[in-house]
Amino acid sequence: MKKILSLVLMACLVLSCMSFGVAEEKPSTWLCDEKTTLTVCTYDAVNNSFPTISNDLRFWQWLEDYTNVHIEWDTHSVADYDTVVATQLSSGSVATDIINVRNVDVAVQAGMNGTLVDAKPYIDTCWPNIVEYDATVNPTVISGVTAADGGIYCVTGKVSPDIGHILYMYNTEWLEKLGKEVPTTLDEFYDLCVAMKEAGDLNGNGEADEIILTASGMSTLDIMGNSFGLEMYEDWDAFVADEDGTVHDEYTSDEMRNFLTYLNQLYSEGILDPSITNTSADEMSQKIAADNVGIFVYYSAFAITYGRLTTKGQADQYAEVYTLGGPLMGPDGDQYYVYRDKVGGDATGVSATSENIELALKWLDVLTSDPLVIKTRTCGWEGEHYYYDENGEMQLIYPEDGSAWSVSELGCGQIAMPHYQTYDQLMNSRKNIPWYMNEYNAILDMDCFIHPSVPQTQTYTDEEYELIDLSRSDVLAYFKEMRAKFITGEADIATEWDSYVSTMYSLGLQDWIDAEQSISDRT
């Protein structure tokens, strides 16, 4: 009996040691010892190119194994999502642990009202990856969402300033037929446009259906304003600071007047797309697919994406249908692109009523800033989708048939939750084509990117918020209305500019300037 008892005790001891060993060998990436469920409210997808966010997607399955946190998704249509958010926030209590508010300003206001958690007291214990990313990669990740009261009520997506920038894309076949090079000055650009217009039937279909210059909309054309000395990027607030720190608006500046005059010239001469004032990215893609576009302005990777829609791109998905172009030197020597240096979308916070506040904050930290998670979200899995060569350079692994895969199909590219985009984002297989990488790197090497002189922020004091709230919507609406009229010639810049300026100030532009001055001084 004693022998049997001894054997039983020995077995128990062995099992105990085995259990202890298993506990000790838990993955270091786990955020909790026991599998814990968090609830997340978000929207389905930003567009049809992304699958609906769910645990059916490989990335979110992998992230659960990586963190030991299970997510229950409360997913809504993107079309209705702002209403969903407004309803939850107005009640003063969010039903899930985590909520994607989308808008930074709305998230900050919700935090200051006590609906979302202030992450600042937890930043050292719960946000190690975000702090490291802010310190080493992009130093606006934290400051860009810090409210005027010092609270940090959300984490957002963030694009590194020079990644995937809006650029000029030029039709390579049309350039070859005309014997032209990619322009580097505004004068060369105009000469190229005129040559394309006068050549006629460059697409060879026997019809006069060529569109020389188009964009996804008026806001995308803002980068052309850089050639006139404007600090513009895709419809962001247009303000500039002098060397002494005095803030001026660009909406009523001489530079804006010169820029709109130039666009009016292109429009009146049949160079600028006649539907530019009401077009969209989807409509632009249809024009490109019909082989009708000579030059378009959009995010750089679409040189490949939209190029594949053309006849040439359908025949060879790696063909250089559109080549990239750098900034154009303007009449006063301005030649730069303004960094897209502002906080991104998908502002996401933790509910103040959550029973797992620290775990929710840690999960957001890993989701947005853990190096391996960023790599996986942008590139897939090492050994399956990419590898490192003997020089330490990342190389992609293509399917045997040479076709392209997309990380979005695996859920990695899903942007209905915040994530950062770095240079590795360009290495996804739909973009990593030698000619594209060489041309984009050449533009980065030009050292032609500048930081805006007035911070692009959405975190305001109560006084700033009141000033902006009273003026911004009316001023912007009138500016966009008159911008379209000036470009199309419905309004005459020569005779109606002064009236336009007076109306802008009567709508409260000075209040907005005062608020931006306060923001610039404070930040």
Image (cartoon, rainbow, N blue to C red):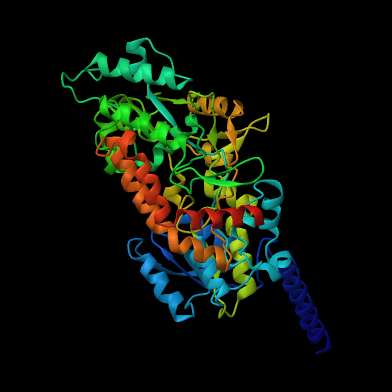
Which residue appears farthest toward the bottom when viewing the image? 1
Q: Nearer the viewer, residue 236 or 516?
A: 516
| Total numbered labels placed on residues in the image | 0
Q: Nearer the viewer, residue 40 or 6?
A: 40
Q: Where is residue 348 drawn, in percent x and y? A: 52, 64
159 relative position to 222: left or right: right
Q: Residue at x 35, y 53 (%)?
A: 477
Q: Where is residue 482 drawn, in percent x and y? A: 32, 44
Q: Which image quadrant is residue 291 in?
A: top left
The N terminus, quarter of image:
bottom right
Q: Nearer the viewer, residue 85 or 493?
A: 493
Q: Where is residue 325 drawn, in percent x and y? A: 47, 25
Q: Nearer the viewer, residue 233 or 131?
A: 233
The C terminus, quarter of image:
bottom right
6 relative position to 217: left or right: right
Q: Is residue 434 above or below residue 135?
A: above
Query: Would you say residue 401 is visible in this rendering?
Result: no
Q: Where is residue 153 drawn, in percent x and y? A: 59, 67
Q: Residue at x 37, y 16 (%)?
A: 191
323 relative position to 378: left or right: left
Which residue appears farthest toward the left when viewing the image? 206
Q: Residue at x 45, y 53 (%)?
A: 509
Q: Is residue 249 above or below residue 446?
A: below
Query: Would you say residue 153 is visible in this rendering?
Result: yes
Q: Residue at x 33, y 35 (%)?
A: 493
